[in-house]
Amino acid sequence: MVNALLTDAKSKMQKTLEAFRHELTIIRTGRASVGLLDAIEVDAYGSRMKIHQLGTVTAPEARLLVITPWDKTQIHAIEKAIQSSSLELNPANDGQVIRVPIPSLTEERRKELVKHVGKLAEEARVAVRTIRRHVVDQIKTEQKAGETPEDDAHKLTAEVQKATDEFIKKIDEALKHKEEEIMEV
């Protein structure tokens, strides 16, 4: 039971870290990233679909995304979805592909994005600490019930704290990297 608690906690912390990193890929930095369009849904074939389900997204240049739809009849639907998104992008199509130029960010917008990324990082840290708190509470409950010896409970609590520190450090590293990417002109 002791190892199961620790393994489960690490698994949940890893999922939190992956979710945070995914959120970071969606944030526009003034540089083309194929993950930038991941959150956009297109009305196609009578349902909502992600852009990557309708075609290939590539970044041939630092400030350009190119979408090559598999079904050319969906070009206008994809273009409309990008225009109506909150990313403030203006795609252009030539009948075969959609080109999405990525404009550079203003200094004010960069600072807003850094603040937003900081909030996302704090939410991820809080989630990791919440996981730790739940596991430590479970350990204490098992200890009081006599299922886990006191020494094992202390060791396990220390292991959970070590894992928590490890994941918070990874979140901080991802945050620092994204902040540098955002502030890069």
Image (cartoon, rainbow, N blue to C red):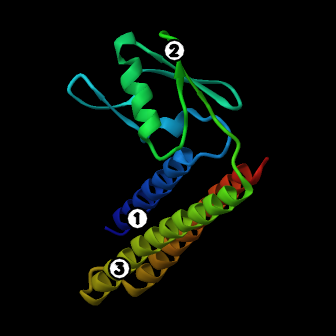
Q: Check residue 9 in the rendering and tell me which mark sits there, or answer none.
A: 1
Q: Residue furthest bottom?
A: 144
Within 10 Å of disc 2 (Cα), the crowding (few <14, some 14-19, many 20+) is some
Q: Residue at x 20, y 26 (%)?
A: 46
Q: Check residue 97 in the rendering and tell me which mark sits there, or answer none.
A: 2
What type is the residue that disc 2 sits on? Val
Q: Are marks 3 and 1 in contact (CB under 8 Å)?
A: no
**Which one is in front, 160 or 177?**
177
- Where is residue 170? Give x, y as percent: 61, 59
- Where is residue 68? Give x, y as percent: 49, 16
Q: Residue furthest left?
A: 46
- The first of marks 1 and 2 along the sequence is 1
Decide if residue 69 is on the left or right side of residue 174.
left
**Which one is in front, 14 or 162?**
14
- State the SS at label 2: loop
Q: Are marks 2 and 3 in contact (CB under 8 Å)?
A: no
| Quarter holding residue 66 | top right
Q: Is residue 162 visible?
A: yes
Q: Mark 2 or mark 3, which is nearer to you?
A: 2
What type is the residue that disc 1 sits on? Ala
- Where is residue 41? Give x, y as percent: 36, 36
Within 10 Å of disc 1 (Cα), the crowding (few <14, some 14-19, many 20+) is many
- The first of marks 2 and 3 along the sequence is 2
- Where is residue 42? Give x, y as percent: 34, 31
Marks 2/3: CA–CA distance: 56 Å
Q: Is residue 164 above or below residue 19?
A: below
| Quarter holding residue 122 | bottom right
Q: Residue at x 69, y 51 (%)?
A: 182
Q: Which residue is mark 3?
A: 139
- State the SS at label 3: helix
Q: Residue at x 41, y 56 (%)?
A: 11
